Image (cartoon, helix red, strand yellow):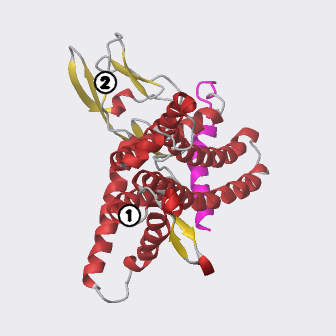
Amino acid sequence: MKRLLTLLFCLCTFAGFAAEPTEGGKKEAAFNPGEMILHHIGDSHEWHWFSTDNRHFTSYLPIIAYRPGKGLSVFSSQKLAAENEGAEGPEYDGLKLHHEKLVSTDGTKVYDLSITKNAVALLGSAVLMLVVFTSVAAGYKKNQGRAPKGIQSFFEPIIVFIRDEIAKKSIGPKYERYMPYLLTVFFFIWFNNLLGLTPGAANLTGNIAVTATLAIMTLVITLFSANKNYWAHIFATPGVPKLLLPIMIPVELIGAFLVKPVSLTIRLFANITAGHIVILSFISLIFIFRSPAVAPISLAFGLFINVLELLVAILQAYIFTLLTAMYIGGAVEDHHHDEEHALDMQTGPAGSVIPNPAAH
């Protein structure tokens, strides 16, 4: 029922796009589902909450722009807001918004330092995580030696699962030093995936800049944690003939520096964005066909995808954290001497193991 109410709320949000009031004998532009979907999954300089037939409910965010020779400009994004959906916004102080990109009217280079919707969502989720986990930490101090209570009892099994099933198994004995990062990555992605499903919310984890930043952080931690065996595997590639090393070394470098972070970036970005696009597409069918008969079908499929997204939200957080732990584990893994040790031993009578003189 809660997810159904969410979808109905979304319908109210998009109803303003479908309305066609006639003022002066002119109709508004036809409903464009592609433009609407891209507008709602992308970043923007304003936070649009919902619309009615008469007005839009929007929070305007600060524009902060720097232009060489002209200095810093700070003002509200309301001054650049378009009067009608899809229309080109007005100019102010020599600046205007073109498809949510801040440009100068005279062609001057613009450095956009504005606080956008995703930036506000990022700060909001950071504050939320600080409040939640400060409370969890306080619960551990208060209930030390006793069974967890309240919010602590909800998060403790998840934290223990990440420690035992991800960190310990993927990284090994050195897992403790990486637990803060793994927990931060997991809960940051999970929280923002869930927040992104609420009506009017920002699509933070569906922004490729955010997922790329997380992937780069994982890459940096992996490279700075790597031991000599990790680099030896890349540059020496054990078991590979020396003639193939000029081919294998670039392949290994591309895999370590490019393929792994790109795969982390694209996997999270694509899965989260795809879910939002599918839900918005089902809702758009109502306004495309303009028939009440389509509404039950759109709501049913939209509700199904929305509930499925609840699973995807935690699944993508788990996958990103698991792959991060595996990459770190491969970098800090000690060289195993089992095969070398086996060469130094031979089997004696009755299965006993004795030193093998031929191996020395």
- At label 1, the amino acid type is Tyr
> What residue would you read off at disc 2?
111
Q: Which mark is residue 175?
A: 1
Residue drawn where x is 46% and y is 29% of the image:
83
Majority secondary structure of magenta residues? helix
**Residue 4 falls inside the magenta stretch:** yes
Residue 158 showing in the rendered view: yes
Q: Is residue 59 above or below residue 190?
A: above
Residue toward you, 331 or 16: 331
Residue toward you, 331 or 220: 331
Asked whether, in this view, residue 280 is left or right of residue 231, the answer is: right
Numbered range of the magenta stretch: 1-28
Residue drawn where x is 49% and y is 46% of the image:
203
- At label 2, the amino acid type is Tyr
**Residue 270 falls inside the magenta stretch:** no
Residue with the most extreme front position: 357
Neighbourhood count class around disc 1 (C-alpha, 10 Å): few under 14, some 14–19, many 20 upward: many
Q: Which mark is residue 296?
A: none
Residue drawn where x is 33% and y is 46% of the image:
224
Q: Is residue 313 above or below residue 21?
A: below
**Percent position (x, y) of residue 221?**
36, 48
Quadrant location of residue 126? bottom left
SS of the residue at dot 2? strand
Neighbourhood count class around disc 2 (C-alpha, 10 Å): few under 14, some 14–19, many 20 upward: some
